[in-house]
């Protein structure tokens, strides 16, 4: 019982420290006020994998496809990603890949 309480307190303390660290890092970033952590993660995934479907990105980030659609729309509007329709199946969602503006960010 005591060990479980200690672990819960440690988890709580860790959450506070990480939250403060994230805020500090975002305040020092040139794009910190424009991009969420998920948006940054999506850019990084696209840099690593070159091209992904929105559904693949949603699964990797553990968000709904609707949420990922909003994230991708925002990144597209800011010029961080580009989209292209599947050549083989026009019904498929756009493939997403890194945009020119994201290159200095990475």
Image (cartoon, grey):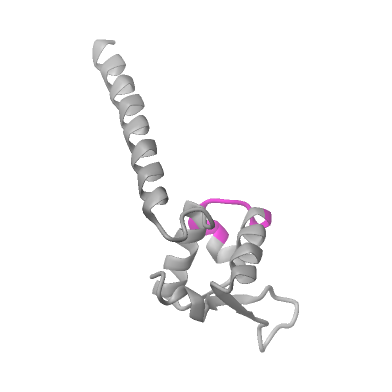
- Out of 45 and 35, give the one closest to the viewer: 35
Q: Quadrant of residue 48?
A: bottom left
What residue range appears in magenta?
58-66
Residue at image coords 24%, 16% = 3
Q: Is residue 63 magenta?
A: yes
Q: Position of residue 93 (x, y in %)?
A: 68, 73
Residue sticking out furthest to the right:
91
Quarter of the image with the N terminus in it: top left
Please provide percent x and percent y for residue 78: 60, 69
Say above or below: 73 vs 11.
below
Which of the 4 quarters of the picture holds residue 47?
bottom left
Q: Is residue 69 magenta?
A: no
- Depicted 47 relative to depicted 14: above or below: below
Q: Is residue 86 above or below residue 66?
A: below
Closer to the camera in the image, 36 or 34: 34
Residue, far bottom: 87
Quarter of the picture containing the C terminus is bottom left
């Amino acid at each position: 019982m005591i060990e479980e309480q200690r672990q819960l307190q440690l988890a709580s303390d860790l959450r506070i420290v990480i939250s403060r660290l994230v805020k500090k890092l975002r305040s020092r970033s040139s794009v910190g006020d424009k991009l969420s952590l998920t948006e940054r993660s999506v850019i990084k995934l696209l840099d690593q994998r070159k091209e992904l479907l929105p559904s693949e990105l949603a699964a990797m980030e553990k968000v709904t496809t609707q949420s990922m659609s909003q994230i991708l729309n925002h990144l597209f509007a800011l010029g961080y990603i580009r989209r292209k329709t599947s050549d083989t199946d026009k019904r498929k969602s756009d493939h997403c890949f890194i945009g020119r503006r994201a290159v200095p960010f990475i």
